[in-house]
Image (cartoon, coloured by chain):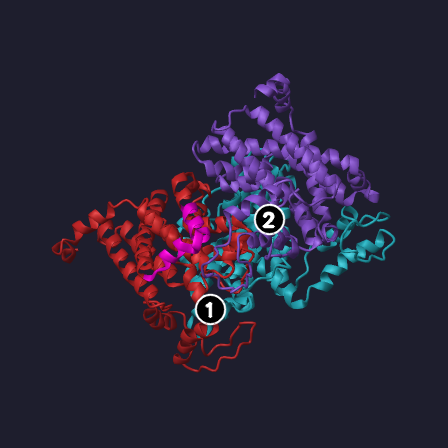
Chain colours: A red, B purple, C cyan
Amino acid sequence: MDLLSALSLGELALSFSRVPLFPVFDLSYFIVSILYLKYEPGAVELSQRHPMASWLCAMLHCFGSYILADLLLGEPLIDYFSNNSSILLASAVWYLIFFCPLDLFYKCVCFLPVKLIFVAMKEVVRVRKIAVGIHHAHHHYHHGWFIMIATGWVKGSGVALMSNFEQLLRGVWKPETNEILHMSFPTKASLYGAILFTLQQTRWLPVSKASLVFTFTVFMVSCKVFLTATHSHSSPFDVLEGYLCPVLFRPVWGGNQHDNHGRPHGGSGPSSPHSALSTKPKEELSEGSRKKKTKKAD
Amino acid sequence: MDLLSALSLGELALSFSRVPLFPVFDLSYFIVSILYLKYEPGAVELSQRHPMASWLCAMLHCFGSYILADLLLGEPLIDYFSNNSSILLASAVWYLIFFCPLDLFYKCVCFLPVKLIFVAMKEVVRVRKIAVGIHHAHHHYHHGWFIMIATGWVKGSGVALMSNFEQLLRGVWKPETNEILHMSFPTKASLYGAILFTLQQTRWLPVSKASLVFTFTVFMVSCKVFLTATHSHSSPFDVLEGYLCPVLFRPVWGGNQHDNHGRPHGGSGPSSPHSALSTKPKEELSEGSRKKKTKKAD
Amino acid sequence: MDLLSALSLGELALSFSRVPLFPVFDLSYFIVSILYLKYEPGAVELSQRHPMASWLCAMLHCFGSYILADLLLGEPLIDYFSNNSSILLASAVWYLIFFCPLDLFYKCVCFLPVKLIFVAMKEVVRVRKIAVGIHHAHHHYHHGWFIMIATGWVKGSGVALMSNFEQLLRGVWKPETNEILHMSFPTKASLYGAILFTLQQTRWLPVSKASLVFTFTVFMVSCKVFLTATHSHSSPFDVLEGYLCPVLFRPVWGGNQHDNHGRPHGGSGPSSPHSALSTKPKEELSEGSRKKKTKKAD
């Protein structure tokens, strides 16, 4: 905090926290979300043959986080759809991205420098949503740590956490994978962010909310812009997880495996499970599926 | 309105709006709904081997619209099940349709003239449900246009909108299709009706609710009776949609397709996409699947 | 009641009803529930490669009944997660069962005499949950018979009723079966128990709640301990159902079957359908699938 104040970052954070999200930042959120819908295989065909299904998917991509949070907190699922202006704005973006003559709108927003600006602005919205979600959950459950984290997480991850059902709406069904099994960077970052914001909300983290929002936004924007610019699918958490996971969740050695699979595991020391853990999931995922997976959560 | 009054239709509409639905109209609704459940492949076998699953499916067919509307509006999912008399009536209908000695009840209600009367009465209930749903949503969200339309739509469509999950209960899973992708006539009509009733509720459509209910009921009854009598699966909206969809949701020509499918499309003008749009979906659906699809939403 | 009082069972039942469930009984519930999760094929591998998904599954196994009941009654889905101590206890059990060095914890709780004690204590919690669920539903819907039964049922059955979605979280999808189609003993017993407790709550069954809880607990504990000790998958209700089902839900004979399957049924009398009904489902289920099915609902 002292450092932040010295650099007058505190005031910057405070002014930043007062910037309204609607309409500019929300617009960026909608553009990037629906862009990633268009990247899905078959999405363009769907939009022409089943515009209603395509529009519903676009709404899930834009407002999935509100729907999930409302479901968890027992509020009306379509509560957010009372914001007519947001819905109309998102619908306009959907129409322009899919049906604009000469595909002009799509070409503009896909131009990398333009896209990077939108991606950066989307992360601003994401962090703000996590913070608001946790504040809202804290209002209902003062000591509900898990509820706060869960609400912040779904507010940050959005449609990714219900990707199976979003796909089902488009007639696609891939039960063998889901966002919990193969978390993308935004989903993981939302989870870690939700934990940080919960600690701040319950005063275990002695920083102001404005500073945390600002710092976490800077982190998310820089990571996401870098990942998008380099078309990378790695995650800054990979290194840390590569160390922690094998220690915390190591396979039980020396004991009989009670797994019905009877899967062979040749490893006879703590180093072998580590490598199995960090390499196997990546081998399994083909390039294509990994690409899609990462996009889904954007 | 003037025309309606002149014909004294206004008074007729008002008296019609006061006719109670329970028990006669509700009974017809249950009979037709559970009849369509019995048409589903494997439904008879299911009822004998797994009566509990069959009964639950029958309840979804009869009360799916209430469950979905309660889900959207954040009310208890089983709220409607506090109407014990309705549940008992629907259960009795389920029992008679599936287990009546000599299949007598089923044969009676399947006799075409009798069935047409029940079908007509079912549409009366459907229109009333749409109107009540929109009134209810309007009570909670005075300016929630989208919420009103969505509530009216699910109240009119009922189990059709959750057919994937109703099938799952019976051990059937067809992820490649759903009611949003291939809307049947009742689902589409419910959507258009919900838009009309929302316009009426928000006073953009200068007619009385009773008149609108009456007019829309007449339209629905005549369409549905005609379609049922002729075993037809077309829809009166096909012509209008055939003109509008290609204009509104035309494929982007002249630009690179960003669809990952790389699907070939030889069309080089606005007329070719039109034909693709109106013929392809029909080619794909086999006669059998179309038949089932249409029935599902009844 | 007189008999019970004479044996001073009434007082015993009353004292029994005052025994607090947290933490000892709840702990047993968590241990047995997560034990059955570890029995699922692939669960051990999942815990090592996707600990987050494994933990979420464990939470569903421990708290699925609360989530389902909250969903039915329109309350926040994660309401129960405000009990931080319960969540932490269940998480600790999950960690110990899956990652304890040398698999020590798992080996201890799997030792049959120990396991039988935990299984017995789990049934105590189950019966108490059914009673509390019905009391809660009765508070909201005084005459909602079906709502009371449904709430008690989901409170008793827990994760079994949403096993399809719990499997989906683990990347497994078996749409051709579900707990409604193939009810295990605990699910059936929960349903019958819910009916009994509803009759008691609405004063149709002239016994005190404490006595009913006590009697039903004794029945459940003895059945479940016997079934677990003998590795049996039969159910005490099989005999009764074998008599009742063919009478109540007999195939319609003498009439044309309107089932699209055109399935052959050579039976020409009431006795033939009976045998088809009672033997066919058992033939179909392989030993492995039956074993899993039974475990799922524990």
Q: Position of residue C224 (x, y in %)?
A: 61, 58
**Could you say where residue A197 lies in the image, as x and y percent from the top left?**
30, 53
Circle on res. B74: none
Residue B173 image point, x, y percent: 62, 57
Residue A110 visible in rendering: yes
Q: Quadrant of residue A119?
A: bottom left
* Callout 1 amino acid: Gly
Viewed as shown, does residue B214 lie left or right of A41? Answer: right
- The residue shown at (72%, 40%) is B228
The disc labelled 2 sits on which kind of residue? Answer: Glu
The furthest residue to the front = B269
Which sits in the foreground, B207 or B126? B207
Q: Is residue C176 magenta?
A: no
- Between B269 and B258, the residue placed more toward the observer is B269
Residue B90 location (% of width, % of height): 68, 38
Any mark on residue B179, and which?
A: 2
Look at mark 1 in the image and give the residue it sits on.
A288
* Residue at x 74%, y 53% (from the top left corner): B45
What chain letter is assigned to the residue under label 2?
A: B
Q: Which residues are magenta?
A: A90-112
Residue under the image location 87 percent in, 52 percent down: C269
